[in-house]
Amino acid sequence: MEDWLRRAAIDSGDRPFLVHPDGTHTTFGDVEHQARGIVGALRSAGLGEGDVVAVMPGNDAASVARLFAVPRIGAATLIVNARLAPAEVSDQLLRARAAAAFDGLGGLPDPGDVGRPDDSIALDPEGDHSILFTSGSTGRPKAVRLTWENLEASAAASAAVVGHDSNDRWHAALPIYHVGGLAILVRSARQQTAMYLEPSFDPIRAAGLLVDGAATLGSLVAPMLRSILAVEPGPYRGVKALLIGGGAAPLDLLTQAAEAGLPVLPTYGMTETASQIATRPLSEGLRPGMSAVPVPGARVRIAADGVIEVDGPMVSPGYLHQPDRDGWLRTSDVGELVDGRLTVFGRVDDVIISGGENIHPAEIERVLSEVEGVIRVVVVGVPNDRWGEEVVAVVEGDVGPGALDRYARYHLAGYKIPKRWVLVPSIPTLAIGKPDRAAIRALAAGQS
């Protein structure tokens, strides 16, 4: 394999790589030039193989160059979430044993962005390219190691699934400190295509780019898609596919997108799989549904207890300062695999046990999301002396408990019907837009 940016700079140096909101662009050659200067600065600072260099990237050209430069010296890039509190940043820098950080992050030495240009590349396919901490939604965040090979395999599989070719432009509003944003960088450099690098998500701009096909591909979470359709109901022409991750997308939203001409591909993945591991086929983009198919090279199976296990070249070798994994990676999710198609029910920790029955919140959430006026719904279990746990639905939208209860009683078994309804102005979320279930459980328990 080759360094993706270097190959793109050789083959397509004058072509746009990063397209900015002000209409300007940065070419592959421009980013390559910046990366070589950073490599020189890193080497002058005495950094090299085995080191960890921290970056807290924004969605900007300078950050992109840093992310491509650090792995070239044989070091791993610790990608730090810009939304973390100072204490959380310090903890991650310490746990990763970072030797340096850009912009003096955490008081560590700053190698700087400008040095004597250095075009050397220390590329070990099995060597660590990046380190990203998980969101911590199931406990203390884990430091995931992603190798060059992991990112290459993930990008290759994605290209095959969505037909990513030289004419595409990817709408990139996900933060690049998240694996979903990082993956877009690698995919675009590997395929030598442009990406609309958005400093933040703007539904009006996103709708404008997608409605006429200026952006042909995109990666979003469900609330982003809903806000886009609220701005511009369509029809959309020229969009090849929108990957939707970060949790289950409501069926009504998928139906609305299909009616607007937006092919939406629900995607299942995680930091440990360098983004997507299973995606709905491109041919089914206008057929609303949540079942997905493992991407090329990926293997998915269901353990006896219903937990999803994965393997393949895109799956991380393990966590930082821990032994490499041996065999399949056991995820934190439960699901089913029928005729090669994966349906994800939700996280193991999200399963509600009420009156001896196992209840999957995702099933209830899918039903309730069909109620008119519901924007977003999250179902959680809270302790109950009689049942062990009781089912509580936390709902964002313009809808009352009566309508929700009537719909639930018609479509769900009695033991799955929420015992309480908590109406909120907005659902608490994590940085990437996924529901913050810990905060939601606390909210639900506090209103008992």
Image (cartoon, grey):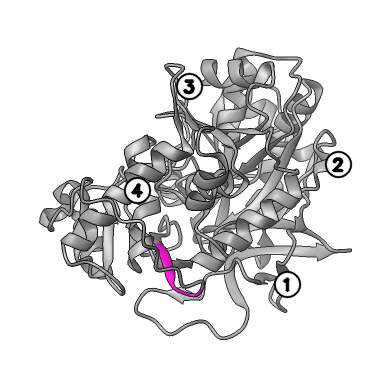
Say which residue label 3 marks: 202
Residue 129 lies within the magenta run? yes
- Figure quadrant of the C terminus: top left
Tags 4 and 3 touching, CB below 8 Å = no
Mark 3 or 1: in front is 3
Nearest the viewer among 420 and 185 is 185
Q: Quadrant of residue 45?
A: bottom left
The mark nearer the N terminus, 4 or 1, is 4
Mark 4 or 2: in front is 4
Q: Amino acid at mark 3?
A: Asp
Q: Amino acid at mark 1?
A: Ile
SS class of the residue under badge 2? helix
Tags 3 and 1 touching, CB below 8 Å = no
Q: What percent of the width, then of the height, locates residue 243?
A: 66, 41
Measured in 3D between alpha carbons, the distance from the residue under mark 4 to the one under mark 1, in whole angstroms, is: 42 Å
Q: Quadrant of residue 1?
A: bottom right
The mark nearer the N terminus, 4 or 2, is 4
Q: In the image, which disc is placed on residue 283?
A: 2
Q: What percent of the width, then of the height, locates residue 436?
A: 45, 46
Say which residue label 4 marks: 35
Measured in 3D between alpha carbons, the distance from the residue under mark 4 to the one under mark 3, in whole angstroms, is: 29 Å
Query: In this image, 303 relative to 112: left or right?
Result: right
Neighbour tally class for label 4: few under 14, some 14-19, many 20 plus, Cα within 10 Å: many
Mark 2 or 1: in front is 2
Query: Which region is colored magenta?
Result: 126-130
User: What's the residue at 53%, 15% (across, down)?
Assistant: 204
Q: What percent of the width, then of the height, locates residue 431?
A: 41, 42
SS class of the residue under badge 3? loop
Measured in 3D between alpha carbons, the distance from the residue under mark 4 to the one under mark 2, in whole angstroms, is: 38 Å
Q: In the image, which disc is placed on residue 302?
A: 1
User: What's the residue at 74%, 19% (across, down)?
Assistant: 236
